[in-house]
Image: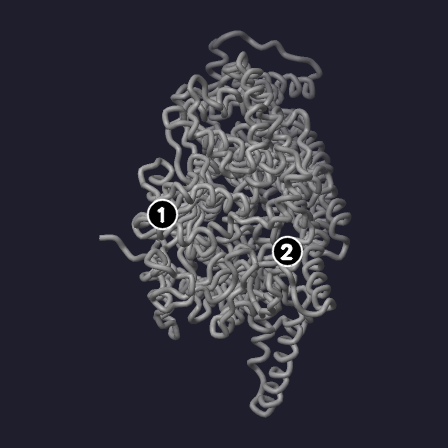
């Protein structure tokens, strides 16, 4: 049994929603119905494109076919000329039959097509003046490209407008369920069927708007009141327009919208392609669907409003903007431990101020309550007045005739111009600055698009972003690669649209080989003949009195099947990249360099292309240096790409936003070390995130992106509270959800692995943390390539982990690699470069190289002074670190000088003792001869003999009787002193180092074990907060040189540090033995 999608959806919207539990039930029902509708729409759209479902108007051109399947209405998103469409209908009217569904479709299509059909006609309609200008001024290629842009833009805008009115949630005003499916080069719009639209004549059901581009406008007072209430929430202005007869109508929505009453007596508003005003920066003939984003409108209204109105509670649209911005910035978390708290600082600064304001207002006494109420009432009236001044007329800069005075029209145009200028002059530079300062750090094309949209920037401005980030290689590469992928996507969709079913695999593999390799055209010999044929066809089509439209021209290739050769075989690498450069210049106003095909990051671009088109390829290592990297067997599947209007839970959104405010205050209080207040803030944040998590689980189920965000924030709260085990549990949930919902290679999944590694490191499970870090690095390099600041930040985290387990050499390598990346990508004076220098200073401090620590911290301080100024807290912290490192360096030098003087005095004392005890000297010599021939023992005996008698005594070979007796004597003395001896009678350390012997004499005590003196010396230095970088270097020169031969020292490090590493490894070996 087929489901009535529209009845289910509208019934769920009419559920009561006064209490929290009622809102949860309503949101769950809406989410369930809409998700099921999207699933059914996907399967139906695939059937429509594969021609498994018959159209309801088979006599119309194929591009104008309409389908009804499973109570869902399907139509192709086609941009064509309304006049040519009417001519085509007039020509085909004589041959059309009037029976059943065909009669119904012929009634609706010419001028009164309701529901989705009206939406298609509205999307297909172009003003006559615009189309004439396009055909007169543009070349043959330009109108086609603009037509393609308008096709996609109109459907996208309609979906955005539907979402906006759904979120406005005005009682009595309904919208249809909608989804956009891109598959095999076609874009299909799926909508729920309007009740009664397919039965009988419904031309009298239009109550609001126009179906013929403003020639006749309908108006209803009841309908207008509902639309006006929605317009106030969407910052749209009530204005007057004229129809073709000169009648004046007062509207609060675009002229081409259609307000219809269905057979269920509900009021439906359709065709919302211009729910926001047109972009004044793009008012040319080919830019009629270039509108401003709702996020920009909200940001502009907030910027223009006075400070007093900022305390007014936000509307639904404003909350969505904050959530979108936090989502885009939340995708680029985990750089260091502190960055996890900084993730939520930027999007909620204004909200924290509002929360503080509301908290202060709660403390007003009862005596002042009346005064406060009156002041608030007057302030709200003023704010309403100011908000009325910042309302936008959606019909300015269009072909529709506006009524009213000229001053009012000019004022409306100025408001739209101000908003457009605000986008170019304020929002874009601020966004570019945030990119440069890494406050926003997109990893791939998808996260870049989300970040642009969250800031209210249309994707057509990506060329401006690329030009503004030329000095940062990773950002320029990211923007240029996204432009290349989007341009190639449109070309590939044209190829797929004209490809038969059996040629899909060869067509995609050939296109990818041309895109990434140097593939030549298969039909190179037939190129000239095919071009001449196409030229003749174009000339014939120009003289055919406009029978076929621009949209129909793209479909013509399917009906006239290629007999010998497919169109994709005419594509070569040179022609493809030439078309990509032309499209990038036309659509994004961006000049791709000549060597663009050599500079693209092939793995990242391939991943992005497959995601945008829906291609599934084989998982193998591709050789992009060959002429044809891809083969037909590499193309596994082609899947639909979907955009939908699934509703979100506003209740959980608000709780998450308030929890973010608490997290920001927690990060502030943590530096002020107020434990009581800190615990209270953490408890409040945990409660809010837990409630949001519970609500979302009831509404959407556990596998949803918003649920993953709640788990991440809960993990942050538990991390700040010191509950590492709880943080790991929540982070593990987020990791699983991100892998299921976003994919294994999504940047959010990589950041989940990074956060998990940091939490494991907090539990001292460093080996497990390093495994998670390696996974995060792999995924980050896959999505963005190895050259990205987030990769360098992950290197710093890995270095800190290696540093904590004592592998200083590996830690230094990671830190120096991070420093190289940041200097190359961000510059030598970037703050992130200063972070690398500070991390290196800390590492050198742990190794006892305080001089190098001071040098690197000095570079950190210089960068911070230049970027932040001397009064910034980070600059002052760096200055304190410099003082600490300098003080430790001076203490180490003083200790060295004192140690040298002490060694000289002790050496003289030892010589005096040995002179008075020649038997002890002979015992040492005999033990040295019997114990081995180490270079350190020989040098010790030679220096000792030289000090005693001025010459070197010859040493016997092998073991003679005297040596044996001497060894036995030494063994007895060692046993008497408590020294441990080996089985063959030689002490653990036959000849102790000179420093150990001197310490024994000075302290009047014997070592407890083999190298106890050395260990005690190190312990004393560590107790003072110092590590001696030169200790035991002279006595272990041979070992240090051997260590250097076995493993090269890290780049940029001196010889002393390499020997220090050798000493550390030797000490570790002795401890294990």
- Of residues 390 and 552, which is closer to you in this image? 552
Residue closest to the eye, 337 or 584 = 584
Residue 398 image label: 2
Q: Quadrant of residue 1035?
A: top right
Assign a secondary structure to mark 1.
helix
Q: Secondary structure at mark 2?
A: loop
Q: Residue at x 51, y 47 (%)?
A: 124
Within 10 Å of disc 2 (Cα), the crowding (few <14, some 14-19, many 20+) is some
Q: Is residue 777 above or below residue 994?
A: below
Q: Is residue 912 visible?
A: no
Q: How is the image coloured?
A: one colour
What label sits on residue 451 in the rendered view? none
Of marks 1 and 2, which one's residue comes earlier in the chain?
1
Q: Quadrant of residue 1044?
A: top right
Separation of disc 1 and disc 2 at Cα? 33 Å
Spot occupied by residue 870 in the image (x, y as percentages of width and height): 77, 54
């Amino acid at each position: 049994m087929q489901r009535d999608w529209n009845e289910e959806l509208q019934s769920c919207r009419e559920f009561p929603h006064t209490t929290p539990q009622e809102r949860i039930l309503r949101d769950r029902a809406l989410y369930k119905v809409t998700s099921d509708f999207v699933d059914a729409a996907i399967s139906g759209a695939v059937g429509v494109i594969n021609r498994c479902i018959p159209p309801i108007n088979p006599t119309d051109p194929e591009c104008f076919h309409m389908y009804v399947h499973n109570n869902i209405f399907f139509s192709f998103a086609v941009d064509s000329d309304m006049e040519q469409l009417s001519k085509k209908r007039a020509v085909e009217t004589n041959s059309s039959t009037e029976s059943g569904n065909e009669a119904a479709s012929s009634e609706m299509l010419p001028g009164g097509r309701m529901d989705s059909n009206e939406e298609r006609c509205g999307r297909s309609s172009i003003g006559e003046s615009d189309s004439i200008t396009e055909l007169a001024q543009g070349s043959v290629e330009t109108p086609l490209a603009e037509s393609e842009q308008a096709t996609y833009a109109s459907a996208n805008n309609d979906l955005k407008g539907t979402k906006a009115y759904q979120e406005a949630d005005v009682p009595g005003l309904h919208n249809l369920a909608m989804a956009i499916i891109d598959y095999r080069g076609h874009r299909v719009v799926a909508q729920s069927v309007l009740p009664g639209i397919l039965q009988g004549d419904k031309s009298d059901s239009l109550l609001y708007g126009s179906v013929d581009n403003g020639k006749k406008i309908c108006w209803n007072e009841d309908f207008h009141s509902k639309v006006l209430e929605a317009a106030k929430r969407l910052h749209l202005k009530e204005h007057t327009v004229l129809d073709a007869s000169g009648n004046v109508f007062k509207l609060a929505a675009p002229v081409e919208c259609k307000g219809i009453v269905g057979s269920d007596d509900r009021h439906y508003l359709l065709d919302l392609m211009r729910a926001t005003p047109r972009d004044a920066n793009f008012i040319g003939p080919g830019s009629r669907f270039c509108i401003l984003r709702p996020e920009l409108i909200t940001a502009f209204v907030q910027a223009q409003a006075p400070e007093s109105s900022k305390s007014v509670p936000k509307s639904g649209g404003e909350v969505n903007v904050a959530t979108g911005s936090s989502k885009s910035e939340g995708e680029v978390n985990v750089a260091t431990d502190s960055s996890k708290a900084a993730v939520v600082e930027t999007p909620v600064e204004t909200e924290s101020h509002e929360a503080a304001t509301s908290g202060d207002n709660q403390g007003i006494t009862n005596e002042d309550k009346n005064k406060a109420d009156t002041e608030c009432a007057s302030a709200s009236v003023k704010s309403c007045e100011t908000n009325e001044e910042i309302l936008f007329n959606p019909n300015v800069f269009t072909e529709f005739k506006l009524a009213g005075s000229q001053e009012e029209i000019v004022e409306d145009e100025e408001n739209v111009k101000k908003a457009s200028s605000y986008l170019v002059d304020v929002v874009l530079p601020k966004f570019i600055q945030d990119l440069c300062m890494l406050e926003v750090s997109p990893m791939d094309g998808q996260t870049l698009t989300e970040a642009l949209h969250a800031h209210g920037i249309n994707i057509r401005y990506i060329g401006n972003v690329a030009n503004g980030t030329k000095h940062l290689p990773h950002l320029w590469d990211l923007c240029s690669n996204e432009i290349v992928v989007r341009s190639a996507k449109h070309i590939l969709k044209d190829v797929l649209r004209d490809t038969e079913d059996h040629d899909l695999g060869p067509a995609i593999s050939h296109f990818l080989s041309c895109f990434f390799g140097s593939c030549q055209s298969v039909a190179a010999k037939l190129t000239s003949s095919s071009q001449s044929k196409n030229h003749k066809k174009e000339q014939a089509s120009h003289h055919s009195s406009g029978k076929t439209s621009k949209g129909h021209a793209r479909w013509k290739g399917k009906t006239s099947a290629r007999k010998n050769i497919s169109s994709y075989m005419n594509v070569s690498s040179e022609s493809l990249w030439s078309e990509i450069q032309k499209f990038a210049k036309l659509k994004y106003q961006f000049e791709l360099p000549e060597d663009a095909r050599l500079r693209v990051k092939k793995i990242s671009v391939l991943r992005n292309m497959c995601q945008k088109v829906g291609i599934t390829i084989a998982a193998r290592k591709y050789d992009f240096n060959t002429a044809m990297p891809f083969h037909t067997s590499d193309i596994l599947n082609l899947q639909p790409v979907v955009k939908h209007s699934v509703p979100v839970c506003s209740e959980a959104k608000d709780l998450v936003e308030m929890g973010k405010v608490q997290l920001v205050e927690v990060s502030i209080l943590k530096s002020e070390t107020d434990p009581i207040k800190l615990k209270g803030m953490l408890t409040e944040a945990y409660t809010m995130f837990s409630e949001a998590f519970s609500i979302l689980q009831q509404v959407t189920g556990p596998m949803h992106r918003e649920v993953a965000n709640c788990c991440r924030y809960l993990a942050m709260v538990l991390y700040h509270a010191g509950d590492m085990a709880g943080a790991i549990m929540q982070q593990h949930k987020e990791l699983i959800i991100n892998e299921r919902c976003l994919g294994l290679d999504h940047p959010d999944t990589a950041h989940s692995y990074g956060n998990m590694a940091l939490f494991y490191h907090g539990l001292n499970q460093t080996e497990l943390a390093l495994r998670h870090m390696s996974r995060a690095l792999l995924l980050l390099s896959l999505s963005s390539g190895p050259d990205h600041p987030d990769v360098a930040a992950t290197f710093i985290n890995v270095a800190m982990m290696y540093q904590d387990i004592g592998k200083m050499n590996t830690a230094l390598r990671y830190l120096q690699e991070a420093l190289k990346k940041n200097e190359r990508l961000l510059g030598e004076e970037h703050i992130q470069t200063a972070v690398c220098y500070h991390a290196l200073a800390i590492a050198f401090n742990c190794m006892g190289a305080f001089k190098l620590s001071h040098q690197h911290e000095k570079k950190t301080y210089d960068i911070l002074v230049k970027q932040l100024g001397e009064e910034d807290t980070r600059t002052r912290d760096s200055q304190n670190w410099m003082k600490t490192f300098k003080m430790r360096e001076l203490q180490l030098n003083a200790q060295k000088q004192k140690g040298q003087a002490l060694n000289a005095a002790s050496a003289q004392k030892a010589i005096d003792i040995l002179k008075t005890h020649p038997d002890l000297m002979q015992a040492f010599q005999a033990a040295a001869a019997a114990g081995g021939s180490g270079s350190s023992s020989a040098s010790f005996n030679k220096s000792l003999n030289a000090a005693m008698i001025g010459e070197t005594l010859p040493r016997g070979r092998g073991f003679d009787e005297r040596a044996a007796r001497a060894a036995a004597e030494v063994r007895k003395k060692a046993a008497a002193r408590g020294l441990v001896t080996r089985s063959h009678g030689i002490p653990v350390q036959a000849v102790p180092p000179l420093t150990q012997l001197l310490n024994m004499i000075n302290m009047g005590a014997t070592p407890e074990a083999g190298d106890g003196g050395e260990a005690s010396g190190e312990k004393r230095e560590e107790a003072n907060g110092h590590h001696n970088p030169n200790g035991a270097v002279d006595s272990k020169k041979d070992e240090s040189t051997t260590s250097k031969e076995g493993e090269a020292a890290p780049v940029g490090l001196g010889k002393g540090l390499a020997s220090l590493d050798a000493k550390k490894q030797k000490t570790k070996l002795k401890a294990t033995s």
